[in-house]
Image: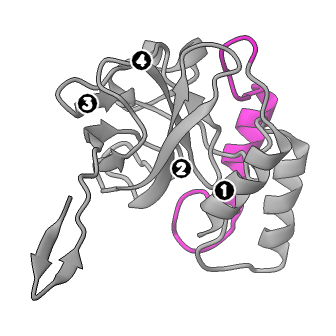
Amino acid sequence: DGWYVDDIAILYYSVNSVELTSFTALIEGLYDGASMVSDTVTVELRNNSAPYSLIDQSKILLNNSGQGTGRFYNAINGTPYYLVVKHRNAVETWSSTPQTFTANSMSFDFTTGQNKAYGNNLKLVGSKWCIYGGDVNHNGIIDNVDLNLVFTDNVNGATGYITTDLNGDMFTEIEDMNIVFTNSVLGIFRKTPQGYVTSKEETIDERINLEK
């Protein structure tokens, strides 16, 4: 198949894709109850049964309302997938149930109810449900290790687009430590379907993707 111009073959391919046409998620710390500091998240599509293999992923820029869109090239209409949200300093969060694309399109909003996340793993900020902030080293749990990272950067006067700046003001300070401390006391951690285990290779790929 293809076109020919002056005996030169021009090949073309049909690339099938589906789109998360309306996706909404708010990150604790970045969201102040009215608007959110714009940032990127990675949204993964995973199989709906153990071991919940990764099917595809898309980096999505969330605007001040926490809204964005993403395109996937390995997903199929009518096939259910868990949506997994990963952010550079927030807790990995799964959709409560698998979701499907219909006519190459899907919409999903994590902010409208705590039950939108697996294990109700969301925090209410104002009237919106947010993804927990504070997993600075992205190991699936907010603990003293994260707190020490933020504390050290605070002492050193670290600035810029860094993982220890949870509220997006380009400074690591007491407000950031408060978020991590509170969530560590609450024992906040990643909640996933039974049988999911993060592989070493996926952890490495995830770290590279989040740092881009």
Badges 1 and 3: C-beta atoms under 8 Å apart?
A: no
Front disc: 2 or 3: 3
Residue 165 seen in this snapshot: no
Front disc: 4 or 1: 4
In the foreground, 211 or 89: 211
At a point 66% along the width and 20% down the height, the residue shown is 192
Residue 6, compared with residue 69, is above or below; it is: below
| Secondary structure under the numbered disc 3 in the rendered image | strand
| Residue range (magenta) | 166-195
Residue position for label 3: 107
Q: Position of residue 129 (x, y in %)?
A: 42, 28
Q: Position of residue 127 (x, y in %)?
A: 33, 28
* Mark 4, other Cα within 10 Å: few <14 / some 14–19 / many ≥20: some
Badges 1 and 2: C-beta atoms under 8 Å apart?
A: yes
Residue position for label 4: 80
Mark positioned earlier in the residue sequence (4 or 3): 4
Residue position for label 2: 29
At a point 62% along the width and 45% down the height, the residue shown is 90
In the foreground, 205 or 41: 205
User: Tag 4: residue type?
Assistant: Pro
User: Tag 1: residue type?
Assistant: Asp
Residue 68, compared with residue 23, is above or below; it is: below
Q: CA distance from mark 2 to mark 4?
A: 31 Å
Q: CA distance from mark 2 to mark 3?
A: 24 Å
Residue position for label 1: 176
At a point 74% along the width and 28% down the height, the residue shown is 189
In the foreground, 114 or 179: 114
| Drawn side of residue 82 relative to residue 90, left or right | left
* Mark 1, other Cα within 10 Å: few <14 / some 14–19 / many ≥20: many
User: Tag 3: residue type?
Assistant: Ser
**Displayed quadrant of residue 74:** top left
